[in-house]
Image: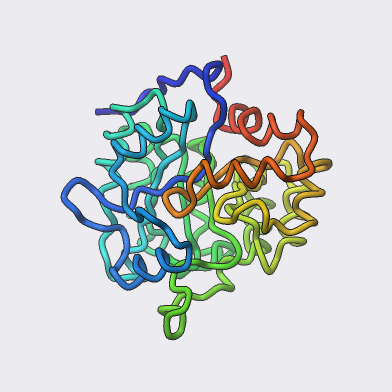
Amino acid sequence: MRYELGIDVDKLDAIDLHVHLEVDSCGHASLPAALTEASAKYFKAEDRSPSLDKIAETYRELNMAAVVFTVDARTQLKHEPNSIEELIEGAARHNDVLIPFGSVDPRTGEEAIARAKHQALELGARGFKFHPSLQGFDPSSEEFYPLWEALQELGLPAIFHTGQNGMGAGLPGGHGIKLRYSNPLLLDDVAADFPGLTIIMAHPSAPWQDEANSIATHKANVFIDLSGWSPKYFPESLVKAANSILQDKVLFGTDFPLITPQKWLGAFADLPLKDEVRAKILKGNAVRLLGLGA
């Protein structure tokens, strides 16, 4: 079943740009057990692995849409991802609230490009998700430029994890996960060399928030999603930029199921933001970026 968008944007209160599906219908988890358990402890998540149907039900009840994805890190983790094909098919069943992004392992070379084209052109993925630290690669390396060229030609956005990692947090050696691959400055090279590729830097990018603010200000094709942190902990520089120069470049995201929309929105209400900026962050910017307008 190919995904076709069925969202009535005018009826939505918000669009969550960052939602994970961590298990497929066969019970196969996207991550090794050690990483799943460590991240659940780090985020104090109540339900680490809701089904796709449960995710759709949650967002339908909240009158929101959600971008949903998994991460293909088979090379680094030596663990097959949960089924991306099933994820997209499930989103097609719930196309009134779910927007599927694909994922490929950049370290698989030509196979990654073929998978990306298949997910986009044949299955209907509306974008892609990458986690450089989890996948163990430097996105600025020219080794991966053919993949970025392919995504640019497809005309679909790509979300890249940036900043601190909940994955591997508290484990010996962080389970081998290297934080430097999530420095947003590595994405500045990609944004400069592929100006037609829309890049979303996921999360407040601590300890590199000033770098992220600068890149999003400088590059028209770079945005920031606000997932993975409760807004009460956002760096002050990010809040100030979101309320002014980056008001058209910042996007609502939770990191559900690690953080619930209710918890995120409760803290977001306390931020000193203009009303018109809140509307852009919660919905307007995503509508434009994802091409959901009439």
Residue at image location 67% in from the left, 54% down from the top? 232
Q: Quadrant of residue 40?
A: bottom left
Colour scheme: rainbow
Residue at image location 26% in from the left, 61% down from the top? 80
Residue at image location 70% in from the left, 40% down from the top? 249
Count of picture labels: 0
Establish if 130 lies above or below 69: below
Q: Residue furthest bottom?
A: 172
Depth check, front residue: 143 or 177: 177
Quadrant containing the N terminus is top left
Q: In the figure, is residue 85 to the left or right of 281?
A: left
- Please state the horizontal and vertical placement of residue 239, each as a whole percent of the image: 76, 50
Q: Quadrant of residue 248?
A: top right
- Please state the horizontal and vertical placement of residue 213, each as a whole percent of the image: 75, 54
- Please state the horizontal and vertical placement of residue 182, each as a whole percent of the image: 57, 65
Depth check, front residue: 241 or 58: 58
Residue at image location 27% in from the left, 53% down from the top? 82
Establish if 37 lies above or below 121: below
Q: In the figure, is residue 143 to the left or right of 175?
A: right
- Please state the horizontal and vertical placement of residue 207, each as a whole percent of the image: 68, 69
Quadrant containing the C terminus is top right
Establish if 123 lies above or below 11: below
Q: Quadrant of residue 118?
A: top left
Depth check, front residue: 93 or 54: 54
